[in-house]
Every structure is written in structure tokens, then in C-alpha cells.
Amino acid sequence: MQQQSTTIAHNALPPPPPKTVARSSRISVHSHIKALGLNQDGYATSDAAGFIGQTNAREACGVVVDLIKSRKFSGRALLLVGAPGTGKTALALAISQELGSKVPFCPMVGSEVYSTEVKKTEVLAEAFRRAIGLRIKETKKVYEGEVTELTPTESENPLSGYGKTVSHVIVGLKTAKGTKQLRLDPSIYEAILKEKIVVGDVIYIEANTGAVKRVGRSDAYASSYDLESETYVPLPKGDVHKHKELVQDVTLGDLDAANARPQGGQDIMSVMGSLVKSARTEITEKLRREVNKVVKGYVDQGVAEVIPGVVFIDEVHMLDIECFTYLNSLLESPLAPTVILATNRGKTLVRGTTDIIAPHGIPIDLLDRCLIVKTDIYNSNQIAKVLQLRANIEGLKLGTGVIERLVQEGDARSLRYVLQLLTPASILASLAGRPQIELEDVSELDELFYDAKTSAMLNTR
Ligand SMILES: Nc1ncnc2c1ncn2[C@@H]1O[C@H](COP(=O)(O)OP(=O)(O)O)[C@@H](O)[C@H]1O
Ligand SMILES: [Mg+2]
């Protein structure tokens, strides 16, 4: 592998860290939300892009999107206020979708800053770095084509008596122009197995690093299988061995983390050390500045493009005065993402103070920077529509009267509450051997679980 002259190496990156389960599941309940659903003039049609109602808030968010796109929103923040389950998180997600498909969206909850291991301000700083994307374009030498042959060659392992090992692998690659047979290292065979590559897939192998990437299934095979999840791609043009422009999306947070990891020798102690440390490596301000410098270099050379994303801080009233002050300074920094805050509190004490009561528990100097958008409570009709949408997405069938019954519950409690009933109800239904959710499943749920209000009444008696 080529050695970079600088100490910051983006192509030394490990595969992007898997998004934690908590973060992705926080988004998956919003998977029906595709955008803000506004027309060309910025008006919201009552139901569009998975959004039901909430037209005022959606239009207001549309204005914010325009401001962000014309770069007139820097140093400011959007504050969403409204009761729980009225779509604040959904709006934030929709804004990031409006900004572009590869825009990083980094959600966090105010209380996440209270960790015993990391400084509060550090948690915020990290979230801001993870919300700034970098698209790196590089031209690399690759072997690309449709796999025509995949044959591992085994041989006796000379070092031990434990059977055979793969000594090399023969890979045949085909393009519109010709075919080439490659004899490759066993480590590449492992990568091929990991990517679950089979004959008929279009892949490329980076010549320098041996990294293997599956592009999709060759469309010559499209007729024989009808898998929905499959992406079919045409047979690559040109030679098998060629220069290809590769696009890699990372965030500044990824770069910080990759460069903070100790890159010591190969001995066992340093491996152990890095295992332990990688759980929480020290990322210093100095390292961030260095990363910034290298990133700026890439941008100036036209190799990379900065894509500011969205930081979403839910339950922002959980932050304390120290965090709010730091947030002010983060908003001022030249490389700041769009900041969206959300809360369901009215006037309340600012955390970390004993006497400052402020709207939403946010100090006035930060409030002054905020555009505030309020979300409204849903009516029965709208609750019914969202329920039906979610049922469709989750592939659940509802029997007669079920929607009406759930809407009643939703009116009494909240939209979030009834949406959460769908999955347990479907489990009860399938346990009882029913193909769809029936009224008795919903009734059984009522016997099994309490909603918050009933529960509170029971406990205070
Ligand atoms: N107007 C809407 N149209 C469609 N789905 C909605 C709408 N508002 C909320 N939802 C869905 O209802 C659930 C709760 O909304 P959420 O955004 O988490 O509320 P909040 O953040 O205000 O507490 C989510 O699954 C969300 O996608
Ligand atoms: Mg929320």
C-alpha cells in the first residue's frame, strides 16, 4: 500500500463503524417519511411523502431548508416544540432528506451528554463532527467486471498438520470488451466470502489495497431471479484493468476516530492495547485541527467536497447551562452543521442553574438564535391515516374495526402510543393463528399493558 506523506490518512480507514442499533432503530420508526412533501411553491399538501397533516410546521421547515440551501442559516438553529408524538423527530429527519440523499443525519438525546467517561462538551463536539460529511473522489486502479469464475485452490498447509488452506484464488472477470483471469491472494478470497460474492455478480477489486466491493448483480441474470432486494447493473464497459473514479462518503467524526486509533506495530501487545482503547479513544482538539487542515487541503485540490449535515438534539431541555454555552460557540464555528433542537417542555428551570427559568429550559441567548416551529396535536382522521401508513410499511393487515378502535386510543393518549401497539398486536394475532390483527388482539393488549396515564393513576392511589 502506498504510504501517505501526511499523518492523516483517510484511505487507511477501516470500514465505516456500524451504526449502533439504538441510532438506527430511532430512525426506523420513521421509515415512511420520505421528505417534507411540499409542492414547488413551498406549500404542503395535506398528505404527501409519508407526512400526514402538520402542514404549518412542514411549510415552516420548508423555509428553513431554503435558508440552509442558500447558506443563510449559519449560526442559527431550528427549535421544534410540541407534545410528544407530534412528529418533531420526523420533521428533523425530513429536513435532512430534503437537503440531499447523502447528507449525514446525526440524532442524539440531550441526556446523552451525561456520561461518566466523557466530558459533556466532548459528546456535543463529537456529534457535530459526525454530522459533517466529506465526499472523497479518487481515481484508483481497479479490476472490474462480472464474475465468471471463482475457484479457490487449496494446498497442504506447510506450517501445520491441520489440513489444507487456500493458497490462492482464481477469479474470472468479464466486461463488454473482454475477459481476464486473475490469480489472487487468499486474503482477497476472505473478502470475497465476506461480501457474499458469487458468479454473476459485478465487482471491483482495488489494485493497491485488495479491497473488494460488490457493485450489484449483472443484469444478464435479471430474468432468472426476481429478488426485490437485488440491484441489477449492466456489464461494465472498457477493460477489466482500468482507472475508476471511486466515491467514498465519510464524516469528520470517522476521520477523527480513525486517526486517533493507535497505529502501532504488529505485536500482540499493541493489538490488545488498541482493542481496549478503541472503545473510547482520546480525540483531542489538536487532532481535530489537524484533520481539518488535511480536509481543507483535499477540498482545495478538488479531491473532496464537504457536505454539512444535520445534528438533531432531542429533549434539548436536558442539556445544562455549560452545554448551552458550548452550543453557542459550536454554532459560530465555520464548519458547523445545521442544528435542530426539539423539546416538549414549556417554561422551566435551565439545568445547572438554581434560578434561571426560561422558555423550554433554554437560555435566552441561545433562544435568540432559534427559529421556533410548533407542531400540532393530530385529529382522529390524521391518526387513522398514519396508522394505516405504518401498517402498510410493516406489512400488517388490520381486521374490521381495528383502525377505529386504535384511533380511539390514539385520541385519548397519543399517536406514538398507538403506533407502538401495532407490533405487539401483530404478535398476539400470529400467536392466536390469525392472519391479520383483529379487535380481540387490541383488547387483549389493553389487558396486558397500561398506558402512561392509567399507570400513573394506579400508582398514586
Ligand atoms: N404527520 C405525520 N405523518 C406521518 N407520520 C407521523 C407524523 N407525525 C408523527 N409521525 C410518526 O409518529 C411517530 C411519533 O413521531 P415523532 O416524530 O417521534 O414525535 P416526537 O418526536 O414529536 O415525539 C413516528 O413514528 C413518526 O414517524
Ligand atoms: Mg422525538
Image (cartoon, rainbow, N blue to C red):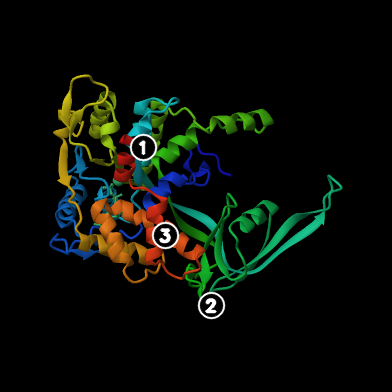
Residue under the image location 29 percent in, 30 percent down: 319
Q: Amino acid at mark 3?
A: Ala
Q: Quadrant of residue 342?
A: top left
Closest to the camera, between mark 1 and mark 2, is 1
Q: Which of the labelled discs sits on residue 220, or is there none?
A: 2
Q: Amino acid at mark 2?
A: Ala
Element assignment for label 2: helix
Question: What's the residue at 42%, 26% (across, down)?
Answer: 118
Q: Earlier in the sequence, mark 3 or mark 1?
A: 1
Q: Crowding near pointer 3: few (<14 within 10 Å), some, many (20+)?
A: many
In space, the residues marked 3 and 2 are separated at their CA atoms by: 43 Å
Mark sitting on residue 425? 3
Pick the front one: 326 or 49: 49
| CA distance for labels 1 and 2 | 44 Å
Relative to 42, 264 lies left or right: right
Q: Which residue is mark 1?
A: 127
